[in-house]
Amino acid sequence: MYAVIKTGGKQYRVTVGEKLKVEQIPADIDSQLDLDQVLMIADGDDVTIGNPVIAGAKVTVSVVSHGRGDKIRIFKMRRRKHYQKHQGHRQNYTEIRVDAISK
């Protein structure tokens, strides 16, 4: 059984027991969250697709940790103009574990 959820403007295909890193969610570590933006649930040949979400469906997750991703280096340059700009960015994330999928 798996589900497709939407969180942080992105879509993720999740199964029970899976850990994944999503955009930062303001929640405490070891807390339970119910994600109700479920776009699709598949259980073998039984596939339920929402329009756009499935009413009453939810995915229960636990917050494992918070962190910051790898640094992305940004370099901008204009040739012959003596313009160079260096910048870096580290995106915050929340690591979650999927506990249950319910319709």
Image: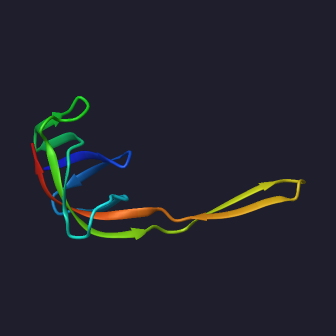
Q: Position of residue 54 (x, y in %)?
A: 17, 35
Asked whether 13 or 92 is in front, the reply is 92
Q: How is the image coloured?
A: rainbow
- Locate residue 23: give its quadrant: bottom left
Residue at image point 85% right, 53% down: 79
Q: Is residue 54 above or below residue 64?
A: above
- Locate residue 27: give its quadrant: bottom left
Residue at image point 20% right, 44% down: 36
Residue at image point 61% right, 65% down: 88
Residue at image point 74% right, 61% down: 85
The C terminus, quarter of image? top left
Q: Position of residue 43 (x, y in %)?
A: 10, 44
Residue, far top: 51
The mark tally for this picture is 0
46 left or right of 62? left
- Locate residue 48: give its quadrant: top left
3 left or right of 80? left
Q: Is residue 25 above or below residue 37?
A: below
Q: Position of residue 70 (x, y in %)?
A: 49, 69
